[in-house]
Image (cartoon, rainbow, N blue to C red):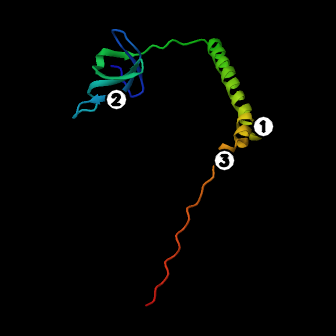
Amino acid sequence: MTVFKPGNLVVLKSGGPVMTVDAVNTDIFDDNKVTGIVCVWFLGEKLQRVRFAHDAIEPARLQKTSSRKRKARLEKATGEYKMVLDEMVAAMNIPADETDASSKVAERPEAKTVVEQPETAPAPKDVAA
């Protein structure tokens, strides 16, 4: 009998998506007696969670990709990611006084906010009788 642990990747013996073991249910009196395997997977963006009998699932057989293909995908992703990061760094390193938007806002008179303080009422005079 295959021993499943949370985190293992499994599939139904009848086929279907690759699922992750979430929990292994055991008998209340015997921890070695598995009563069900709770599996989770995504169907689109919705998380599915179902309990299956131990005999209905098997370990998923994952296809291995060649190291050459994996390296090519990694280099492509790294290149695209580096380009985006370089653009962000360049944008953040532009001094504020050189940007058109910030200098135009500073020159507009309506952009300056004036806060007026309310006048304080004079203190009451002590009336001595």
Q: Which element carries disc 2, helix, strand or loop?
A: strand
Q: Which element carries disc 3, helix, strand or loop?
A: loop
Circles 1, 3 touching at the beta carbon (< 8 Å):
no
Q: Quadrant of residue 79?
A: top right
Q: Amino acid at mark 1?
A: Glu
| Discs 2/3, front | 3
Q: Report crowding for label 3: few under 14, some 14 to 19, many 20 or more residues within 10 A (C-alpha).
A: few
Residue 65, compared with residue 89, is above or below; it is: above
Q: Quadrant of residue 42?
A: top left
- Residue 88 spot, x, y in % from top left: 69, 30
- Residue 4 spot, x, y in % from top left: 37, 24
Depth check: 107 or 29 in front? 107
Tag 1 residue: 98
Residue at image point 42% right, 27% down: 7
Q: Report crowding for label 1: few under 14, some 14 to 19, many 20 or more residues within 10 A (C-alpha).
A: few
Tag 2 residue: 23
Q: Which element carries disc 1, helix, strand or loop?
A: helix
